[in-house]
Image (cartoon, grey):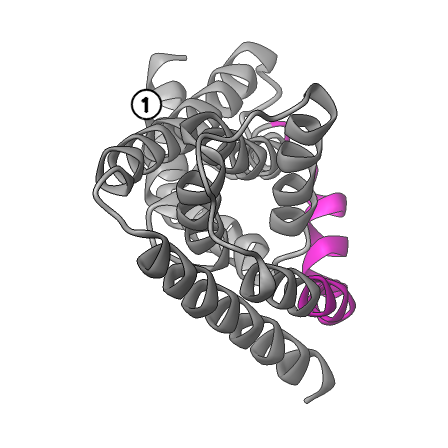
Amino acid sequence: MLSFFLKGLLVGFSIAAPVGPIGLLCIQRTLSGGRLRGLLTGLGAAGADAVYGGIAGFGLSAAAGALVGAREWIGLFGGMFLLWLGARTFMAPPAAGAAESSGRGLAGTFLSTFFLTLTNPMTILSFAAVFAGLGIAGSGGDRFSALALVSGVFIGSAAWWLLLSGGVSLLGRALTPGMLRLTNRVSGAVIAGFGIAALSGGLG
């Protein structure tokens, strides 16, 4: 069981670490809304990673096959969402001070990246490839091992987002409003670029 947890930890951290649209969004939200909002952005992605970890850990091969088979349609939905999110981020004004997020706002922060990560075809394919490579696609019916795997994936992914949001929060104290505005513009443009790429792949 410990080996499944450690493998899940490795998978969760390694899949979360590459900087993609979620990473950029975490950085932008940390700078504009504070460390908690940035962390919740990442935890939404970690929750989605845990879902895919559960699919592999509990041996739900039919669900995994359906997700991979539908990756083009999922990619189209995710691409449109990324375009909308990129435009919103691009137009966002720089924060004038410390943000005070409501409970509703924090819930939306978490859920937006949770569903965005679920609709990212690269996340689906990355988990399929990594689990196959590590030989952990299924836990032989052992529910405790599967739970250990899912827990490891979530904690490993969450650890990365904690490090990223914490580091960016410390850096953000030295940034001027002009630099924050530029960060919003660059982040929004790149996130929209990921959306265009996802749509191109789905339509191609």
Within the image, what quadrant is residue 92 found in? bottom right
Q: Answer yes or no: is residue 55 visible.
A: no
Q: Quadrant of the C terminus?
A: bottom right
Residue stretch in magenta:
58-81
Question: Is 42 positioned to the left or the right of 44 in the image?
Answer: left
Image x and y of residue 183, in percent: 38, 60
Within the image, what quadrant is residue 48 found in? top right
Where does label 1 land, which residue? 6
The front one of 77 and 112 is 112
State the predominant SS element of the stretch in magenta: helix
Q: Is residue 13 magenta?
A: no
Q: Quadrant of the N terminus?
A: top left
Q: Residue at x 44, y 50 (%)?
A: 28
| Amino acid marked by disc 1 | Leu
Q: Is residue 70 magenta?
A: yes
Question: Is 57 positioned to the left or the right of 61 in the image?
Answer: left
